[in-house]
Amino acid sequence: MQTDLDNAHAAMEAAPEDDTARLKFYERLADAELFLMLGAEPLGGNILPALFDLEDGRFVLAFDREERLSAFAEGPVPYAALPGRVIAATLAGQGVGLGLNLGVAPSAFLVPAEALAWLAGTLDHAPGAAEARPVAYGRPEGVPKGLIAALEAKFARLAGLAARAHLVAVTYEGGARSHLLAFEAAAPGAEDALAKAVSEALVFSGVEAGAIDVTFLAAGDPALAALTKPARSFDLPPPARETAQVLSPAAPGMDPARPPKLR
């Protein structure tokens, strides 16, 4: 069964001169849960990735399925399940690249240390804040299909962070025009994550000099009545159902504010 990374890698390989396809692959890499091969069992908040010296430099190995890791290692090995973005941020600047799905999948690929550093820097970019008063809304015209697809892909991974998102053209007091994405009923504290997801969708969709303004409206806000009529609306997935699984807060990579430490 093909994974999202397999498909994105195939699209990138089929069009090596297509910057958008390459950006889409790196977006999928950032969002994927990867199984990072370790050289020893995790110790507290520290992990020790297995390092491999290859012709192109030093690499750690990660796989987008646990069974792919087992197939490569020909048996059970210690690993840490981490988002690709966490691995990129942890390795950035250390001169270590990432070997993805080597020998076990069509998406086998060596991500050089320089590319990992670029990815970490791109993901670290935070959107700026500004204030403006909308005076009119309209249908969102001229929004690239690639950006719509990127937003839909991001929203699919934001379960429980908001009820809906509404994309409209907006005119502000003073005459400035833009596109506005209004999140309805955002979960408390989710605003930064939602704004960052939109910023990443812009970057990885390949839209040059593109911009989307983001705002947050409570359920029942009077502005929703005028805004939603011309909007292109997206439903975000509901919160995931609770399970009996208990995750330790000290598990490496589980707390975004405390990334795993290499030792």
Image: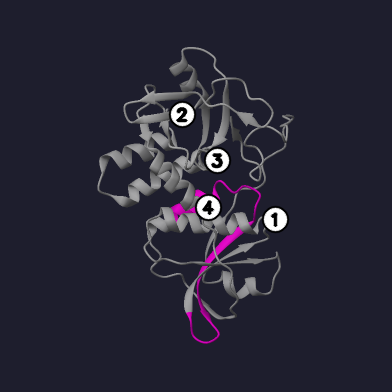
Q: Nearer the viewer, residue 33 or 60?
A: 60
Q: Nearer the viewer, residue 262 or 188?
A: 262
Q: Secondary structure at mark 1?
A: loop
| Residue at (66, 25) in percent of width and height | 43
Q: Position of residue 97 (x, y in %)?
A: 42, 35
| 157 vs 183: above or below | above
Q: Secondary structure at mark 2?
A: strand
Instruction: Please report contact status of discs 2 and 1: CB closer than 8 Å, yes or no.
Output: no
Tell me how far mark 2 sits from mark 1, CA to CA: 36 Å
Q: Secondary structure at mark 3?
A: helix
Residue picked out by circle 2: 60
Residue picked out by circle 1: 187
Instruction: Please report contact status of discs 4 and 2: CB closer than 8 Å, yes or no.
Output: no
Label 1 CA crowd tier, 10 Å (few <14, some 14–19, many 20+): some
Q: Position of residue 34 (x, y in %)?
A: 51, 32
Which is more N-terminal, label 3 or label 4?
3
Q: Amino acid at mark 1?
A: Ala
- Residue range of the region highlighted in magenta in the rendering: 148-176
Residue picked out by circle 3: 86
